[in-house]
Image (tube, helix red, strand yellow):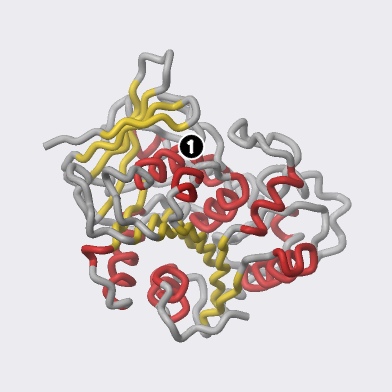
């Protein structure tokens, strides 16, 4: 059976359909930032070997094309889910290896002792042109240029839609009381490149309004990103005068900000401070030469390695926002850049499922 639920999200009509496909499971490699940003020669990335078994169907008014985005999920969407009280949406890393993050989410769900009937786990997959061509997916599957999806930029085709708007579409479906009448909580989480996406979405994302109107709590979990979106030129590294990209998107709110972003910077910061954001940092993620670390001048200005960058960013927001800040910092002792270990740790389970045993810093 094929199910499509259509709702309007801004100027985009969205349907979510479930179809069964066949894919291989294999790990892949692509840096968090573009090779050009990292100061290395541009390389053609390896295509993904596995594509999500479900599809988000997207159609834009006035445009004849229909677009699809792959998705992994642990529940059928062709019937209402009255037992579901929580949804956990995980954004994969720069490798686009959604299957691995889906597996990590399932492990975390089991470790938390949470009944899967009550938790919907879903991982959308943002593909690039090489993925679509290698897997023979056709012209109707959405694809981005390189790592553009991580910064909320529009897709290359077939519809030029922001990756942030795709998440809006998923949240709109979760907010439908006909499909999820007893939903109480939605968690949007990411590690590494996925955490870069989640942190920016937590600042500029507009898709939670319908959930908030239903009194559904929304939490953002930002685990070990390579960089953060800043609201000022304040950085821990002082020699930033020769860095023209310091305050440009995706490091700041200047320059080529995606068309998706419509609010003024001051309003975005106030709203962000009030959102429930958890920074989940591995205390051993301290390699300044990690192959996927953003070593652009704008990245380096945020600190020498991910643990330092996250800690400084949190302290900076505390100084700027004071008691208005609703964010927390959770540290995973002894874990480096490992999404699976981060999410299945005691503090990872606290961030994702509100489990006890992890004190905030």
Quarter-of-image position of residue 85: bottom left
Residue 156 drawn above or below residue 206:
above
In percent of the image, x 77 and y 49: which residue is there? 246
The answer to whether residue 269 shows anywhere in this view is yes
For the residue pair 299 and 208, the one nearer the viewer reads as: 208
Residue drawn 41% across the image and 75% down it: 349
How many marks do you count on the picture?
1
Residue 179 or residue 309, whichever sits in front: 179
* The residue positioned farthest toward the left in the image shown: 1
In the image, is 184 to the left or to the right of 256? left
Could you say where residue 226 lies in the image, as x and y percent from the top left?
Answer: 60, 60
Q: Secondary structure at mark 1?
A: helix
> Does 209 appear above or below 196?
above
Image vertical order of residue 263 relative to residue 278, above or below:
above
Q: x, y percentage for residue 153?
A: 56, 36
Which residue has dot 1 on it? 165
- Depth check: give the residue in front, 134 or 189: 189
Q: Quadrant of residue 350?
A: bottom left
Q: Nearer the viewer, residue 74 or 300?
A: 74
The answer to whether any part of residue 133 appears in the image is: no
């Amino acid at each position: 059976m094929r199910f499509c639920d259509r709702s309007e999200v801004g100027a985009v009509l969205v349907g979510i359909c479930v179809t069964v496909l066949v894919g291989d499971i294999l790990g892949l490699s692509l840096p968090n930032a573009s090779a050009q940003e990292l100061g290395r020669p541009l390389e053609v990335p390896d295509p993904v070997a596995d594509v999500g078994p479900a599809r988000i169907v997207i159609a834009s008014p006035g445009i004849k094309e229909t677009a699809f985005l792959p998705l992994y999920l642990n529940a059928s969407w062709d019937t209402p889910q009255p037992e579901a009280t929580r949804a956990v949406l995980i954004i994969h890393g720069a490798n686009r290896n959604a299957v691995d993050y889906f597996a990590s989410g399932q492990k975390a769900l089991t470790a938390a002792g949470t009944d899967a009937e009550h938790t919907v786990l879903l991982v959308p997959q943002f593909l690039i042109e090489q993925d679509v061509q290698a897997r023979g997916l056709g012209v109707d599957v959405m694809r981005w240029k390189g790592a553009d999806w991580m910064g909320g930029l529009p897709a290359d085709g077939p519809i030029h839609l922001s990756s942030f708007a795709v998440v809006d579409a998923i949240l709109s479906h979760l907010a439908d009381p006909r499909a999820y009448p007893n939903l109480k909580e939605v968690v949007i989480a990411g590690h590494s490149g996925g955490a870069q996406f989640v942190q920016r979405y937590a600042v500029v994302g507009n898709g939670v309004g319908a959930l908030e109107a239903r009194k559904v709590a929304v939490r953002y979990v930002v685990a070990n990103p390579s960089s953060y979106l800043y609201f000022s030129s304040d950085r821990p590294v002082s020699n930033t005068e020769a860095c023209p990209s310091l305050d440009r998107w995706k490091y700041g709110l200047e320059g080529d900000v995606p068309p998706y972003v419509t609010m003024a910077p001051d309003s975005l910061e106030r709203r962000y401070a009030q959102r429930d954001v958890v920074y989940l940092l591995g205390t051993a993620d301290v390699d300044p030469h990690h192959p996927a670390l953003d070593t652009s001048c704008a990245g380096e200005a945020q600190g020498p390695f991910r643990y330092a960058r996250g800690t400084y960013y949190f302290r900076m927001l505390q100084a700027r926002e004071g008691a208005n800040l609703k964010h927390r910092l959770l540290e995973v002792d002894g874990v480096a850049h490992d999404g699976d270990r981060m999410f299945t740790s005691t503090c990872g389970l606290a961030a994702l499922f509100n489990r006890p045993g992890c004190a905030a810093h």
